[in-house]
Amino acid sequence: MNNKLNISNRLRTIGDFINSNDKVVDIGCDHALLDIYLYLYKTQYVIASDINDKPLKEALKNLQKYNLVDKIPLVLSSGLEKFKGNEFNTLVIAGMGGMTIIEILREGKNKLFNTKKMVIQSNRDIPKLRSFISKLGYKIEDEVLIKEKGIIYTVILFKKTKKKIKYNKTDILVGPILKNRKDTLFKEFINKEIEKRKKAYINIPKKYILKRINLKKEIRILKNVFN
């Protein structure tokens, strides 16, 4: 194969959580670069899915480029709508907002019976994601921060568990794995999260008392991470 595959550090980090025995469905596959990477270097069971036809057409071009048209199925689907649940044991959902991911999982909840593992990378509402997915019976196995083009991304590995896992407010807000980090990138991440909430607090009208109280609590938790 003469074509060299170049993917972002974000996608490569997501791929690091995939093993050879994983049967992967990538929801929101975009141009399928991650899926090609997974097939070539991680697992030879990958299904690429997207809600829109346009990215799937670009994905097809990439599959043709790497001679993988007959290896990686492309599925036009809104979330898990077109799946039964027995086609995969691993879900990858990356590059979209947390509430969108929650909606996908909520609507496809009855199709997660065989899902042992999820690799999630959201651009927003990460605490809500941690809370929602843990209530589905998954524990947070690992979390990684990756900085790309000035943006800090969080990649989370969830694994199915029969044990009752209870996370505290710091676990949900910061992450049970990440909260133990003390490196420069983590400090930058925490400082950005604090500033984000300070700005939000200023812009919330005083009549929304609960929202303002919750934001102050979150700011206090974030500040206490390093104490």
Image: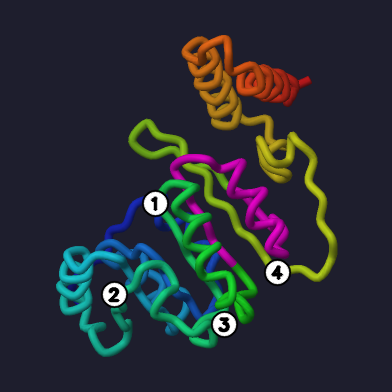
Q: Nearer the viewer, mark 1 or mark 2?
A: 2
Q: Would you place residue 58 above or below residue 190 in this image? A: below
Q: Is residue 136 magenta?
A: yes
Give the residues drawn in magenta, as a range. 118-143
Marks 1 and 2 sit apart, C-alpha to C-alpha, by 17 Å
Toward the viewer: 164 or 121? 164
Q: Amino acid at mark 2?
A: Leu
Q: Residue at x 50, y 21 (%)?
A: 196
Q: Earlier in the sequence, mark 1 or mark 3?
A: 3
Which residue is the site of mark 1? 95
Marks 1 and 4 sit apart, C-alpha to C-alpha, by 22 Å
SS type, badge 4: strand
Q: Earlier in the sequence, mark 4 or mark 2?
A: 2
Please tell me the numbered disc located at residue 21.
3
Neighbourhood count class around disc 1 (C-alpha, 10 Å): few under 14, some 14–19, many 20 upward:
some
Q: Nearer the viewer, mark 1 or mark 3?
A: 1
SS type, badge 3: loop
Marks 1 and 3 sit apart, C-alpha to C-alpha, by 24 Å
Q: Nearer the viewer, mark 2 or mark 3?
A: 2
